[in-house]
Image (cartoon, coloured by chain):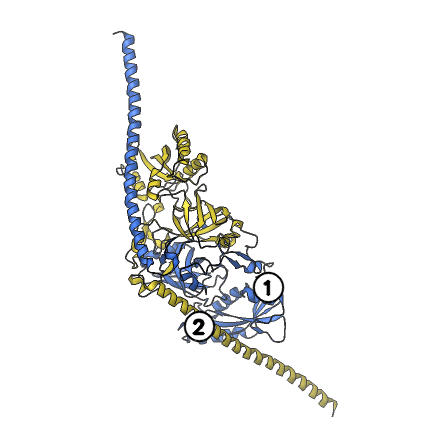
Chain colours: A blue, B yellow
Amino acid sequence: MSYYAVLTFVVTSVFAYLVGNRKGRLDSQQSQAVAERERTLRKEERAGRTRAEASKRLRELTSQSPGAALKEGPTVYPLKPIGILESCFRQRNGTPRQPLLVPAAKARLKLRPGIPHACLEGLQGYSHCWIIYIFHRNTDLQDLWRGDDRGLKAKVQVPKLNGQRVGVFATRTPHRPNPVGLSVAAIDSVDIDTVVFRGADVVDGTPVLDIKPYIPYVDGGVRATAPEWVKDDNESSVLHIADVRLADGVSATLQQRWQESLTDKATRPLCDNAAEFTELLVQVLSRDIRSLHQRLQHVNAVPRHVNHRGGNDPHVSQYRVMLDGMDVLYNFDESGSIEVVDVDIDRLYGETNS
Amino acid sequence: MSYYAVLTFVVTSVFAYLVGNRKGRLDSQQSQAVAERERTLRKEERAGRTRAEASKRLRELTSQSPGAALKEGPTVYPLKPIGILESCFRQRNGTPRQPLLVPAAKARLKLRPGIPHACLEGLQGYSHCWIIYIFHRNTDLQDLWRGDDRGLKAKVQVPKLNGQRVGVFATRTPHRPNPVGLSVAAIDSVDIDTVVFRGADVVDGTPVLDIKPYIPYVDGGVRATAPEWVKDDNESSVLHIADVRLADGVSATLQQRWQESLTDKATRPLCDNAAEFTELLVQVLSRDIRSLHQRLQHVNAVPRHVNHRGGNDPHVSQYRVMLDGMDVLYNFDESGSIEVVDVDIDRLYGETNS
């Protein structure tokens, strides 16, 4: 064999080996990919079966409920609250329209029996969290639970737009196809099975579906824009209140009523003392809490149906708000100032909730 | 009558008039306050009756369902999705762990029949919105729908903490007492009864309970803090991927498979073209999407159960991800780089969903 023949043989062998090896690797990779796809198929099939069983079970659970909704279309999901929220807002009137506007507002969530306490472990490491809840005081809930869609509203009147109508999904209105609310709140304390929040715009007795930590870089890192009317209330806002003050003597009355309320079975205040309640009251009244109806009546004409005319002054109307066990009367004058004129124990609360 | 007598009479009269007038105003104010409280009482009574009726109706609706949950404790709320979300993520694996991490990810929500189209009017004025949905792919849903609390988990393993366990309410895990998710997404378009989102971290087929506009000054204006481990992924994060690249020829393969997929019944891609899909793929792989289990096996020991070893290199593992109708194989090397090695049409999707 000549030198060249040997060289050719060696080079060809090495080349063939390299090509063969590469092809082998490619083949092996391909067959392994095929095997892997088959494994995934089996896994998917298993997962599919699990899903089918879950979905069958869910159908069993819900198929006994009446209503056309269950005959076809999406499944109905039966959600059970993790607890009920106690709040200083015992009526929808006075409950802030957005979260964190009233930092002095306290709310307390105690996990219902059945939810393990350890669910809360680590929550105290966050400053804020989301609350997902049911708008249980909606007066149209009955229609929704009926099971058909007759009660569904498409649009709502917006306070900031003086009543102009907007699609419900373009607002945070409680009146929406699913009466589910979303609020952010500050975490005041976490203790065994109880979380105390501050700044929640949620009414007393609210069933809570879930709480989730507020993650600053995700939730707050969004460079979002919104329509011009959806902006923070400022002096030019229709909801702006120029000044909130207590009439002479009201502070003393408040102090006295608060002391009485501590021995009154009807109340179970969330505020610690009269000073904290006063702070809460001023924060609540610092935005116009009147209904759109009340406000438009006041603005557009000589008011007739407003609760009560303050003295002889045609420019002053009187309203009330129930707050943390107290019943508060206040005058609203045309310049946008509020004067609190009387405070009493809210005995309605005890009666309607006992 | 002396001058002083006249003066005294006049002064006394004026004083008496003033005092009487003030007293009258106070009396009138008080009696009106009482009348007003009575009116409110009647109104409350009426509202209470409405609530009682709604609650009775709800009890009727839910009392036929089995399970101890319904015998006592909070009511179960039957929520019906407003629509089902189509997403390019057709498996949980590969779905981003947080919203907005993958801006190229599209999702489409079409309102179900029964939801008025006008609900969406005005939504296009916002850049982002919240999506509240059901984690329908949870494998433990069956336990939850059973009606008792046996399936409830108290803690979950956190990927960023290498598996350390934290209370479910201190995380955004899908496995929570109510399988309800909350994500923010960019609004791409709003058209009659359909919203297209970008950046949603939501799996295909997700039942949506609600969408709400993201209100920058409320939702993003929160000065929130979170534990140190809850921070954006950076180079020191365990989930950081140094580099994502396509192996030689994969780009051409991808282009070809994409063309084929357009005539393939199994797929209905949300991406507009192969380039958009490539962008999506790179964004998805830019964070470690492997399960905690897979990752820890890779880090802690010579991997055994990982899907497939890439070639002869013990430091490279092979994984796959299904994305927008495509089935993607990629290698993961120990230095934290990813190489996409093969792309094919995801035929499993068509099979499991037809």
The circle on residue A242 is: 1
Residue B209 falls left or right of residue A238: left
Where on the picture, by quarter, is residue A249? bottom right
Q: Which residue is mark 2?
A: A349
Given the image, on which type of amino acid does mark 1 rest?
Ala
Tag 2: residue type?
A: Tyr
Residue placed at 30% from the left, 49% from the top? Answer: A52
- Helix or strand or loop: what does disc 1 sit on? loop
Q: Chain of mark 2?
A: A
Of the 4 image quadrants, the one containing the C terminus of chain A is bottom left
Labelled pair 1, 2 in contact (Cβ < 8 Å): no
Give left or right: position of B143 versus B219: left
Point 28% across, 16% down: residue = A13
User: Alpha-carbon neighbours of circle 2 within 10 Å: few (<14), some, or many (≥20)?
Assistant: many
Mark 1, Cα crowd under 10 Å, few <14 / some 14-19 / many 20+, is some
Q: Position of residue B298 (x, y in %)?
A: 30, 38
Chain identifier of the residue bearing label 1 in the image:
A
Query: Farthest top residue?
Result: A2
For residue B234, which quarter of the picture?
top left
* Above or below: residue A44 compared with residue B208: above
Between the residue at mark 1 and the residue at mark 2, the CA separation in whole angstroms equals 30 Å
Q: Report x, y in % for residue B170.
A: 37, 53
B57 with respect to A306 (left or right): left
Nearer to us in this view, B167 or A52: A52
Query: Residue B75: where, in percent of width, then height?
Result: 36, 63
Q: SS of the residue at dot 2?
A: helix
Between A116 and B203, which is closer to the camera in this rendering? B203
Which numbered disc, 1 or 2, marks the residue that appears first in the sequence?
Answer: 1
| Residue B312 seen anywhere in this rendered image of the structure | no
- With respect to residue B240, does B41 lie above or below? below
